[in-house]
Image (spheres, rainbow, N blue to C red):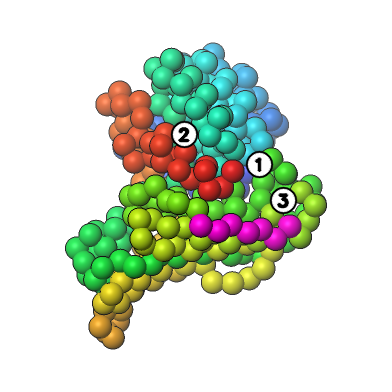
């Protein structure tokens, strides 16, 4: 599968490194609003600079990874699907269930795969935690919590300040809410949601309390302070804790008072979702069995 990366910010480097490790995916180029920026990245990774996004659309490339500012996602997804390109798009892919409905229907009409990029869901550590929960290692699951807190020191013109597509719940809550949804494999019921609007455009702190058929859940996100960022699953016999759960290969669990380390193979944090995407395209599967439309809807209901 030939793939082009849209957007040449710092995240593009990490995506490109992941692409290079996937055996059935070839990174063939970059596109950006700034043609010179695209050329710099293309030279670095020995591939082609497509210049602007529109320059790419009539190429014979199979797929695109959209890693641009959130406010461009809808327009770029639409253009790519209309030109029969498979699309994987960085979270948050879209901002409402209505947009989600429209783009998944467009993908279906054009025989394309559309997938939101949730790397945390595909990490081996996440699969390990899910299997431990299923096997009853820490007993019956009673509570789950996920936090993502960082002090971004964002300037006023940063994309995260945008009132429609920014805010910490949309940006960081994608990790917390989506990971909890995946681990519990249930549609959550919203119990409580609160924001702290320390700037006039978007939230800088968000707390969400959810219920998953009797299992309580807590999401805490902030982009203007320092704090703990972790996943904690609590059961009747102990608990599991994974610090920085969206990018690591280790953690620990405590069962009946004894601590045990968890460590799994970690190739690259972007490798696993990219491999999944490439395998789906190879097998002409046009909706991920993991990141389904319903999965995206369940997250959007909480974060939109």
Whole-percent x and y of residue 226? 63, 71
Question: Residue at left 72%, top 44%?
Answer: 163
Q: Which residue is mark 2?
A: 88
Is residue 193 positioned above or below 257 on the image? above
Residue at mark 3 to residue at mark 1: CA–CA distance: 9 Å
Mark 2 vs mark 1: in front: 1
Asked whether residue 120 is drawn in magenta, I would say no
Contact flag, marks 3 and 1 (Cβ < 8 Å): no
Residue at mark 2 to residue at mark 3: CA–CA distance: 26 Å
Mark 2 vs mark 3: in front: 3
Please tell me how crowded label 3 is: few (under 14), some (14-19), or many (20+) other residues with Cα within 10 Å.
many
Question: Residue at left 34%, top 68%?
Answer: 142
Is residue 242 positioned above or below 286 on the image? below
In the foreground, 134 or 160: 134
> Residue 165, labelled with which disc?
1
Q: Secondary structure at mark 1?
A: loop
Q: Secondary structure at mark 3?
A: loop
Q: Which residue is mark 3?
A: 202
Q: Secondary structure at mark 2?
A: strand
> Residue 3, labelled with which disc?
none
Q: Residue furthest left?
A: 135
Is residue 204 positioned above or below 295 on the image? below
Q: Is residue 29 visible?
A: no
Please tell me how crowded label 2 is: few (under 14), some (14-19), or many (20+) other residues with Cα within 10 Å.
many
């Amino acid at each position: 599968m030939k793939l082009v990366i849209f957007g040449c910010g710092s995240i593009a480097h990490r995506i490109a490194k992941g692409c290079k490790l996937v055996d059935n995916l070839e990174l063939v180029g970059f596109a950006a609003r700034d043609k010179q920026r695209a050329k710099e990245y293309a030279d670095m990774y020995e591939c082609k600079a497509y210049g602007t996004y529109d320059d790419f659309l009539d190429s014979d490339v199979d797929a695109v990874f959209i890693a641009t500012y959130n406010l461009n996602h809808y327009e770029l997804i639409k253009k790519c699907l209309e030109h029969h390109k498979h699309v994987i798009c960085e979270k948050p892919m879209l901002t409402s269930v209505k947009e989600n409905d429209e783009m998944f229907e467009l993908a279906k009409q054009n025989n394309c795969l559309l997938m939101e990029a949730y790397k945390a869901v595909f990490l081996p550590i996440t699969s390990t935690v899910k299997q431990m929960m299923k096997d009853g290692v820490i007993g019956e699951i009673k509570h789950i919590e996920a936090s993502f807190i960082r002090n971004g020191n964002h300037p006023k013109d940063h994309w995260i300040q945008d009132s429609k597509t920014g805010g910490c719940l949309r940006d960081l809550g994608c990790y917390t809410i989506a990971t909890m949804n995946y681990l519990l494999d249930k549609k959550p019921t919203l119990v409580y949601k609160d924001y702290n609007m320390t700037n006039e455009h978007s939230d800088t702190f968000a707390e969400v309390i959810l219920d998953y058929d009797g299992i309580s859940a807590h999401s805490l996100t902030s982009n203007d302070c320092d704090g703990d960022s972790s996943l904690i699953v609590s059961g009747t016999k102990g608990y599991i804790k994974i610090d920085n759960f969206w990018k690591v290969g280790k953690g620990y669990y405590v069962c009946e008072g004894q601590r045990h380390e968890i460590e799994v193979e970690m190739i690259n944090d972007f490798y696993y979702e990219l491999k999944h995407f490439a395998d789906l395209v190879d097998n002409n599967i046009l909706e991920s069995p993991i990141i389904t439309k319903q999965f995206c809807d369940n997250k959007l209901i909480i974060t939109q």
